[in-house]
Amino acid sequence: MEPDVRMQTDLGRQKLYSPITVASGTFDLENLDFFDQEFLGAFVSKTITKQPKVGNPPPRLYETEAGLINSIGLQNPGLDSFISVHLPRLRQQLKVPLIVSFSGTSIAEFQEILEQLEDQEGIAGYEINVSCPNVENEGIAFGVDPKVVYELSSALAPHTQRELIIKLSPNVTDIAKIALAAEEGGATAIALINTIWGMAIDHRNGKSRIKKGIGGYSGIGIKPLALALTYKAAQSVKVPILAMGGIYGWQDALEFFWAGASMVALGTANFIDPLSVPKVYKGVQGFLAERDLYLGELIGKCEL
Ligand SMILES: Cc1cc2nc3c(=O)[nH]c(=O)nc-3n(C[C@H](O)[C@H](O)[C@H](O)COP(=O)(O)O)c2cc1C
């Protein structure tokens, strides 16, 4: 595929040929059988943790009338197996930069994971998932406290020259403060949003649709919230924003660029239509060509 200069974007330290990527946990290498992977500016892998995780008991996915509720529970093979089995596969098959998503239960554990990944080649950057419970803070998620987000990013930033993307949780009172804390701590980009809380109940018998009760809600229903938080975060930080939340079509993607995102990720959309990535790419590309615009000319130029 010929790179299109109109579609180029910056994500922190990197210049990327496409402003479209995939949201962690929603897209695997197998999905790349459906289209030319160069439609992607980067590939974000599923969150890994130090120890393997079997995840939550089923049922753990439910499709609502406007999006998806999941309680996968960060099922993953753990760091060692990621490094020995999965990373070599990703390295071999990917032609686009790889962003590895990881999470931890303490700042020391995040640091330990980073250190081990730093020894590995073929990684362009990290997406730090801060939606997980912090064992040193009564199990409250890292991402809700600006002070903790600052401590975490400043504990990681000096140890890497790679992209350091902090992925924020939307379940917070002031996203602008948290985004700023990540930037001040040394994040090279901010990703948002992770899923919001959601629940669904079978009205006939009162049974929760997913075993755990409350899960993470994603997809079209969260788009207005994701857009508002993208806009707010973009007003408060200078680093690029990787936005996601309910982006299905190219028109949705454009809304996020106008709001201030330098790059967008497709998540739930991949389950609905595996060709979402090339469709969104081509739609945005067509829009820019028709108006003789470069992507950079509309990022953050939303009018009130
Ligand atoms: C089934 C499923 C699994 C997910 N797993 C992860 C994950 O491992 N790590 C993470 O940071 N986000 C995870 N997410 C959240 C997505 O990356 C994304 O932030 C969220 O779904 C919002 O985007 P969307 O509305 O386009 O899906 C998951 C979402 C879904 C639906």
Image (cartoon, rainbow, N blue to C red):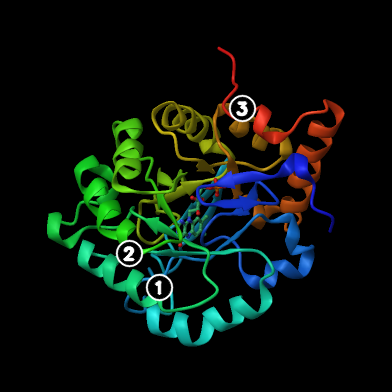
Q: How many marks?
A: 3
Q: Quadrant of residue 146?
A: top left
Judged left or right of residue 150, residue 128 is right
* Identity of the residue drawn at 29% across and 47% down: 185
Read off the residue under disc 3: 258
* Residue type of the residue flagged with mark 2: His
Which residue is at the front of the view, 27 or 157? 157
Q: CA distance from mark 2 to mark 3?
A: 33 Å
* Residue type of the residue flagged with mark 1: Glu
Lower position in the chain sequence, tag 2 or tag 1: 1
Q: Quadrant of the N terminus?
A: bottom right
- Residue 262 image offset from top left, x and y in percent: 58, 39
* Identity of the residue drawn at 59% across and 45% down: 10
Lower position in the chain sequence, tag 1 or tag 3: 1
Q: Looking at the image, is 231 positioned above or below residue 32?
A: above
- Residue 179 image offset from top left, x and y in percent: 36, 38
Which residue is at the front of the view, 249 or 205? 249
* Identity of the residue drawn at 40% across and 54% down: 207
Q: Which mark is residue 159?
A: 2
Lower position in the chain sequence, tag 2 or tag 3: 2
Which residue is at the front of the view, 45 or 182? 182
In the displayed image of the protein, which residue is found farthest to the bottom?
84
Q: Quick one: SS at disc 2?
A: helix
Judged left or right of residue 222, residue 109 is left
In the rendered structure, are the residues bearing label 1 and label 3 in contact, judged by CB atoms less than 8 Å apart?
Answer: no
Q: Quadrant of the C terminus?
A: top right
